[in-house]
Amino acid sequence: MMLTVTDVTVHYGTFEAVSGASLEIGDGEVFALLGPSGSGKSTLLRGIAGLEPLTGGTVAWDGTDLATTPVHRRGFGLVFQDGQLFPHRDVAGNVAFGPRMHGASREERAARVRELLELVGLAGYERRRVTELSGGQAQRVALARALAPRPRLLLLDEPLSGVDAELREQLAVDLAGLLRAAGVSTLLVTHDQEEAFALADRVAVLDGGRILQAGPVREVWRRPADDRVARFLGVTTVVDAHAADGVVTSPLGTLSMNVEDGPVRLGLRPGALRLDAGGDIAGEVVSLAHRRDHLRLTVRVAEGLVVQAMAPVLADPAPGDPVRLTADPDGVAITRPS
């Protein structure tokens, strides 16, 4: 089973919110639409769901065009940022809503509710009022409700953005496990890179209504299509370099990386450079900022280049101090000069 989106365009009046978007989602695959606010990702999801009319292009399931299929007959489950639970129903009533609408018997509904509450870690919550749930619990119930009628595609629109940062990290881990356990094809919309890369098998980066790059998570993360994508994916500094025989040479020295020979650009994320007394990159601290679990340093290195680096939270460098850094290839993205 496969969702195929071909050259989809969506207009709001004269404004083109989505332009010529194409993607495919395979059976059991988790696919993320990643982009900043206003990039068109939620509009694309709503167009796929049938909630927004398409100006052009097609949305098809296993080769069948869904243009004349209404939202409630597409077999898609929807989870939005606020969950949109029914406040007058308890947890069981929310989860059982879909199966009831599909004609399931009382016994079948009760079994499905138990199964899904166990899956989302809320066993025993059947009679809990949804108004008594925490934000994280409410999103778990919303997910269970969307899964209850056994959808062929699950659509998640910023499902974790309504909870605090610490809870979001744990929910992302839990949600990744839930989606794999459910085995349902999923389209996830998010502006959070860590969320997308924690959950998805493949990712598409959108901006200005266009898909700038799509591919497997690790490929997109390590090899952004251009500087624009790289900066959205956390790159803070871009350095010109040259690759030859698996060695990349730049003003920062040399790195061993699997890249084709020729001119390249190194995209440095904050974790690409780390404070290390034995490191081979010399620099001077310009400024520093405290984070929850590390220090973020701004360092002037060779040829006046200014880069970001990380240090342990208990480190004590000060502006003007000489430091040495070491490079971590896992924090480096590779792009080609345009």
Image (cartoon, rainbow, N blue to C red):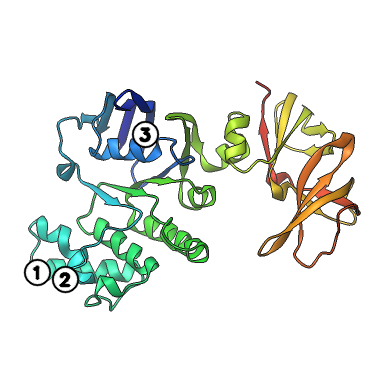
Q: Are marks 1 and 3 in contact (CB under 8 Å)?
A: no
Residue under pointer 3: 24
Task: Please give left or right for residue 308 compared with residue 133 in the image.
Answer: right
Q: Secondary structure at mark 2?
A: helix
Task: Please give left or right for residue 104 compared with residue 7 in the image.
Answer: left
Q: Are marks 2 and 1 in contact (CB under 8 Å)?
A: yes
Separation of residues labelled 3 and 2 (CA atoms):
35 Å
Residue under pointer 2: 110
Q: Which quadrant of the rendered structure holds the N terminus?
A: top left
Q: Amino acid at mark 2?
A: Ala
The residue nearer to you, when weighing 1 against 33, is: 33
Q: Residue furthest top?
A: 338
Q: Residue at x 49, y 52 (%)?
A: 195
Q: Which mark is residue 106?
A: 1
Q: Secondary structure at mark 1?
A: helix
Separation of residues labelled 1 and 3 (CA atoms):
37 Å
| Neighbourhood count class around disc 3 (C-alpha, 10 Å): few under 14, some 14–19, many 20 upward | some
Q: Amino acid at mark 1?
A: Arg
Residue 319: give x, y in percent of width and height: 86, 54
Of mark 3 and mark 2, the one earlier in the sequence is 3
Of mark 1 and mark 3, the one earlier in the sequence is 3
Q: Residue at x 23, y 31 (%)?
A: 53
